Image (cartoon, rainbow, N blue to C red):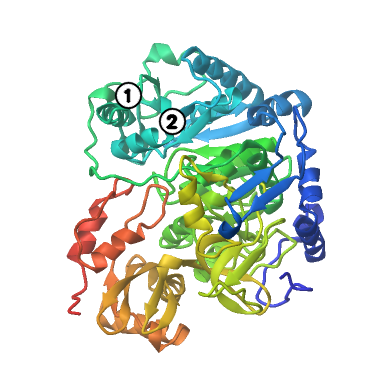
Amino acid sequence: MIPDKAPKEDVFLGSEDLKKEAHVPSFDKYKELYIHSVENPGEFWGDVAKDFFWRNKHTGQFLDYNFDVTKGEIFIKCMEGATTNICYNLLDRNVHEKKLADKIAFLWEGNEPGDELTVTYRELLQRVCQFANVLKSQGVKKGDRVSIYMPMVVELVVAMLACARIGAVHSVVFAGFSAESLCERIIDSQCSLLITADGFYRGDKLINLKLLSDEALQKCKDKGFPVKKCIMLKHLSKEPEEIVGSRSPPAKRSCPDLEKKQTGKAKKTRPVPQGVLHTVSGYMLYTAITFKLVFDYQPDDIYWCTADIGWITGHSYITYGPMALGATSVLFEGLPTYPDVSRMWEIVDKYHVTKFYTAPTAIRLLMKFGNEPVQKYKRKSLKILGTVGEPINPEAWQWYYNVVGEKRCPVVDTFWQTETGGHVLTPLPAATPMKPGSATFPFFGVVPAILNESGEELEGPSEGYLVFKQPWPGMMRTVYGNHQRFETTYFKKFPGYYVTGDGCRRDKDGYYWITGRIDDMLNVSGHLLSTAEVESALVEHKAVAEAAVVSRPHPVKGESLYCFVTLNDGVSYNQTLEAELKKQVREKIGAIATPDYIQNAPGLPKTRSGKIMRRVLRKVACNEKDLGDISTLADSSVVEQLFQNRCCTAV
C-alpha cells in the first residue's frame, strides 16, 4: 500500500529548516508510524490520548466496529466508557496546565480593513464560562440541541464552546443559508434555542440575519415546532454606549437600523439537511493530531484557515484542532477580493501568518488577476500552504507553490469529508514528497482501497471507487436520527467498506489522486471520464482561469461533455480559442473526452464558501429552469447570465 521508498521525480519537499523541526521528518519515519498505526491502532491512538484530560479512562478495546451490513448493524465505537469535556481540554487545560493564559487564541480580522480584535485563551475561557451560564439560565441542559447561525466572529466560537462545556449539542448553520434552510435544520436537529446575530457584511453585501432568523422561527412555528428562545448578538447595530468596555470592536460599517432593512427574499425550496454526528473523544483526538502533523504545528505559528466555521473545515481546523494544541489562529470575516484582490496577502503580512489553508476555488479566483497582487506583499513568514474542499488541478497547485509560496513552502493538498472528521489522504510536510494535484498517501490509522464496480479490490496502478477498510477515531458515528440512512449511504453498496462516494486513481508510485465525486463521472460511449480531469486539461490553457464540466444527456453516446470556462482578464472568447481548447483536451486525455459544448462563463455559480454548485450548471446545460434551492449562492445573477449564454444544444 505504501511504497518502500519515496519516488524522486516530479515532487516537492520543504526547506531544510522545515525538515529539521518537522514532527515527521522523513518518509521512512512516516512509513514506520503508519504501519504501527494500522497494525496496533489501540496503542497508537492510546499514545495520542495521553496528551488530553480524561475524567474516566476507556474500558475495553480502543476502537471497535462493524462495516459489513450482512453481519448486523453498522457501528463505530471509540474509547467506550471514557468521559471528558472537550471545552475543558481546549481552554482550561491550556490556561491552567499549559500556562497559555496570555497567549492569543484568535486574531480577528473583520470585513473592513482595520476592523480587528485579539482574544487570549484566558479571555476566551472567561467569555465561554459566562455564556455557558447564560445558556443554563435559559434552560439548556446536557443533550439539548442548540442552533447557531452566526457570521465569522469570535462570539461564534464562544457559542460553540459554551454548548460543549455544558454538554449541549451544537448545530452550526452556515450564515449564508436561507430562512427555509435554517428552519429545516432546526427542526431536523430538534433544537430548543437559536443563537444568531443582527447581521454582517460580506464585502459590500449586507446579510440581515435578524430578519432571516425571525422568518425561520416563524416557519418553525407554522410547521408545529415552535422555538421559544433566541439569543441575538448585536454585531452591526451597536450603539456608542454599548461599545464602551465591550470585548467586541465597533463595526467599521455599522447599521443601527438593521431590523428595518430587507436584503431580498431567497427562493423558498426545501433543502435536505444531513446531520452528520461526531462524538467528543474520537473527534478531539483526530482533529488535534491531524492539525499537528499535517500543518507541522509549532508553538510560535500563526495559523490561518480561510474556511467558514459553518462548514466542517471550520469546525475541525479553526475551532477544535488548533485550540486543542493551544494555537494562535486568524479568524477572518471578509472575502478574499474585498476591498481588493490583495486582501489575503495583506493579512498574511499583517499577522505574519506561517501556515495558510484555503480552497482551490479561491486559488483559481486569485490566479485570474495575475501575480502582481500577490507579489506586492512579502509573504516571507509563510512556511506551509494547504488546500481543502476539492481536488486542486496541477496548474493551480503550481501557481500556489511557485508564486504564493515562492517555491519554499510545501503544499499539503488534503482530502477528507464532513463524514471523516479530519484529513484522511494528505501529504506530510518534509516527510512525503508531493506531486502537484495528488492527495498523496493515507493519514495514520486510515486504510484506503480502490474497488471496481463488482466490489473487488484493485492492486497496483488502478482507478475506481475510493473506500476505507477500517475506522479512525474522528469518523462519523451515524446520521442524526436516521441510522438506516447512514448504513444505506455509506455501507450498503460494498459490504465491509466505508464508501466515500469519490472516484480515485492510484499511480505507479502508490500516490492517490481524487478524480471527483462518482456522480461527477461521465459515461461517454461506455468510457468512464472524470470531470475533474477534463477541467484540469482546460485550465492548462493560458487563456483559461477556471473551468467546470458537467454531463448532458446524449441520444447516442449516453452522456456528453458540457464545459464552462472563465477566461483570464483581457482574453476574448472566439471560435479559434474554442478549437484550441477542444484540441487541448483531446491531446491531454484522448478523443473520447473532446468537449461537445464549451460555454464562455464570466462567472460560475458558487456558494459563499467558494464551492461551485455543479447541479446548477447541469440545469443550465440541460436548459432546465427549475433550479431547486439556490439560497447559498454568493451571486444569483450569475445564473441568469449563464442561461443567456447557453450553447445551442440541438441534440
Q: For residue 509, what is the image quadrant?
A: bottom right
For the C terminus, which image quadrant?
A: bottom left
Label of residue 226 in the image: 1
In the image, residue 259 sits, relative to residue 289, either above or below, namely: above
In the image, residue 71 sits, relative to residue 216, either above or below, namely: below
Judging from the image, what secondary structure is the residue with disc 1 in? loop
Image-based side of 78 in relation to 307, left or right: right
- The one of 264 and 377 positioned closer to us in this rendering: 264
Q: For residue 151, what is the image quadrant?
A: top left
Give the residue at x 75% y 31%: 53
Image-based side of 205 in relation to 143, left or right: left
Label located before the other in sequence (2 or 1):
2
- Residue 389 appears in view: no
Label of residue 540 in the image: none
Image-based side of 183 in relation to 77, left or right: left
Judging from the image, what secondary structure is the residue with disc 2 in? strand
The residue type indicated by label 1 comes to Pro
Give the residue at x 65% y 49%: 381
Image-based side of 203 in relation to 446, left or right: left
- Residue 589 appears in view: yes
- The one of 461 and 28 positioned closer to us in this rendering: 461
The residue type indicated by label 2 comes to Ser
Give the residue at x 34% y 38%: 184
Instruction: Pinpoint residue 395: horizontal percent, then vertical percent.
Output: 51, 70
- The one of 526 and 625 positioned closer to us in this rendering: 526
Instruction: Pinpoint residue 317: horizontal percent, then vertical percent.
Output: 59, 44
Mark-to-mark CA distance, 2 and 1:
13 Å
Mark 2, residue position = 147
